[in-house]
Amino acid sequence: MTVLLIIIGILLAISLPIFALPLTFSWRRDREGVSEWRFSFGVGYIYEKGVRILGFKVGGKGKTKSKDKVETDVKSEKIPTEEDKGVSEKEEPKKQTEKKKPKKKEKKDNKFDFREIIELWAHRQLAKDVIIAILRFLKSLFRGLRINRSELVLWLALEDPYILGSVCALAHSIGHIIPKKLDFHFIPDFASFINYADFWGEFSLRTRVYKVLVSILVLTWFLPKRELYRFYKKQKKAKKKKTIT
């Protein structure tokens, strides 16, 4: 019994730091349109160029060909001679005589089946329970998120200055509702008289591993697992009957 308690204590001591690891997602875009994102998980991070764990690169984009390799590839291409042209001209009439048989197009059954709608209507309660479980999962997940920093700038120009003024008034009214952590700026351009919009800025969201696991447990708890399994088996049997017929 004491050995079992020691093993459980060791496992808890190892797992607790893992559960407490921070998960951070950050995104940034500058005025020139260059954007970058990063998902960090304590010991490393994932970004658009690959993965880095403890400072070592694990993946990345494919290697591009160097100029020397491109030149050798061009040189290695065979230039067709007059003899090769003569042989190809003789082979062309043979290819023209061999006509391919036209393939028969398979007719697709696009008939309206009213029984499918009846089946979907019969399982409307199952769909409702699944949607409720997903909404509870998202609610639990968003509760665990924290905003580290946020700064978003929206630049807008329109041909009609009256519409742009209305949008400007709406944006300023929304700006009072948005939380202070979300630093939002709206820049209207009344001088360009063109329809154009651009945005730049950065934001960062933070959570922890145990909060994500709690959200997953909420999803698995509220999902109608037996009903989903029965529905899956029923659909599988129906597909088998269709293939046999």
Image (tube, helix red, strand yellow):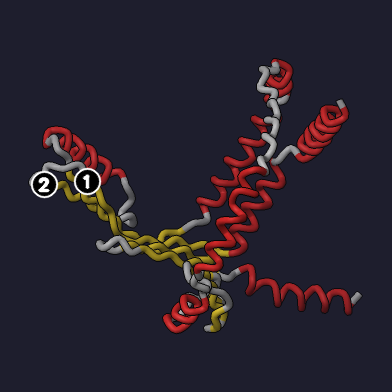
The correct choice, above or below, for 59 with respect to 162 in the image is below
Pick the quarter of the image with the N terminus.
Answer: bottom right
User: Is residue 161 toward the left or the right of residue 181 in the image?
Assistant: left
Identified at 66% across, 48% down, the residue is: 218
- The spot of residue 22 in percent (x, y) is 54, 69
In-front residue for pair 3/178: 178
The residue furthest right is: 1
Say which residue label 2 marks: 192
Residue furthest to the left:
191
The quadrant in which residue 222 appears is top right
Within-10-Å neighbours for mark 2: few <14, some 14–19, many 20+: few
Check if mark 1's residue and mark 2's residue have beta carbons within 8 Å: yes
Residue 196: mark in rendering: 1
Mark count:
2
Residue at image position (52%, 62%) is: 207
Type of residue at label 2? Answer: Ser
